[in-house]
Image: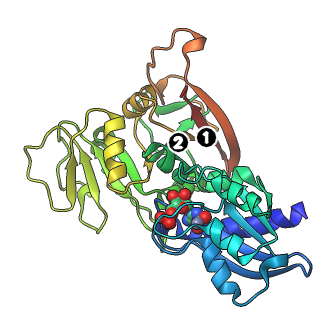
Amino acid sequence: MMKKYEELMKICLDEAQKYRFDVAPNPMVCAIIYDENNDKIISKGVHKKYGENHAERNAIIEAGDVDFSDKTLIVNLEPCSHQGKTPPCADLIIEKGFKKVVIGTYDPNPLVCSQGVMKLKNAGIEVISGVLEDECKELNKVFIKNVTKKMPYVTVKIATTFDSKIVTAGGESKWITGEASRAYVQKLRAQHFGILSGSGTVLADNPALTCRLKGERSPERIIIDRHGKIPFDYQVFRDDDTRVFLATHNLERDFPKNVAPVEFANFRDLFAKLYNMGVYSILVETGKTILTTLVKQEMADEIYKFVSPKIFGTGMDFIGNLNVFKISECYKLEFREIERVEEDILIKARFLYDE
Ligand code: AOF
Ligand code: ZN
């Protein structure tokens, strides 16, 4: 049966992710009601919009007038136990008399946090947890950070040579990685709420920082420009219905109406402010200086490093001085995945910080 649960959980993950931007800062959740005796899916329910029905409730409504007493509910997140904008799913599941509940991962929301499972178990429902747990956590990594830290989830994207260089000794940086890697970055942009870049990169390349994939949404732009050096006719400031946050200390300018200046003390302060304005995840695409500061301030959650099979020898390293003199002082990561992207390799790694 475990293989079957995994197969159904995959369907949940697939369905849930379609509503990433509509449900935020809530998690992406899908529930399936399954008849084990007849190997049949009875119904599917998805959490589709923040403030509206949770996945379990939608699956139950969709099932209609059914006897639930021999049915299994599969859901990628622990059913909630609290009264939020909607009533507790665990209570509804108990009321309907389900036989079994299969969950992917526990809900880290301090208001739920394994109390949903406890309620179900106390009511005599069999609970199986941890089905495709890693995948379920990965899907909702932004929610997990949001609900536990009230901060956006921050992913740094870098493209380097095999010897971790980002610029040649002669000052060239285009292009280090291949076309497939650059197309992959477009997909990443579409999945993030915000994209962050700095004045160095913007002044050098005048990038648009949009997602150029058809039908996909572009992230909101966050530009770090402490001294207000970037002219407002640069591409990042154009008015295209996407909010632009300008992180700056120079408030003396007349800002275009689509540009919101944000004063900040450090990255923690800036990110907390952005979180409160609905920027729940950020893709950082900057140069060495900002990346170094970000890592020093322990504000990056994850790094996506595209490595191209080229060697520059001398040139600019992707990261600068972190004041690490002893190995025991180094910044630590955990490798999560390695993917081949045509001629390049993508390494996904998570930062490990002491709590
Ligand atoms: C579930 N199923 O589909 C979702 C859950 O304000 P509310 O009522 O929408 O509650 C939001 C919280 O409920 C959210 O922070 C998370 O802990 C949980 N989300 N739970 O059982 C769902 N979206
Ligand atoms: Zn719920």
Residue 4 seen in this snapshot = yes
Q: Quadrant of residue 194?
A: bottom left
Badge 2 residue CB within 8 Å of ligand 1: no
Judging depth in this view, the residue of 351 and 235 nearest the camera is 351
Q: Quadrant of residue 250?
A: top left
State whether residue 43 is above or below residue 336: below
Q: Quadrant of residue 302?
A: top right
Label 2 crowding class (10 Å Cα cut-off): few <14, some 14-19, many 20+? many
State the mark number for residue 22: none
State the mark number for residue 308: 1
Q: Quadrant of the N terminus?
A: bottom right
Reading the image, the residue beneath label 2 is: 176
Q: Position of residue 238 (x, y in %)?
A: 24, 62
The residue lying at 69 percent from left, 78 percent from top is 44
Q: Position of residue 348 (x, y in %)?
A: 62, 42
Q: CA distance from mark 2 to mark 1?
A: 7 Å
Q: Is residue 118 left or right of residue 353?
A: right
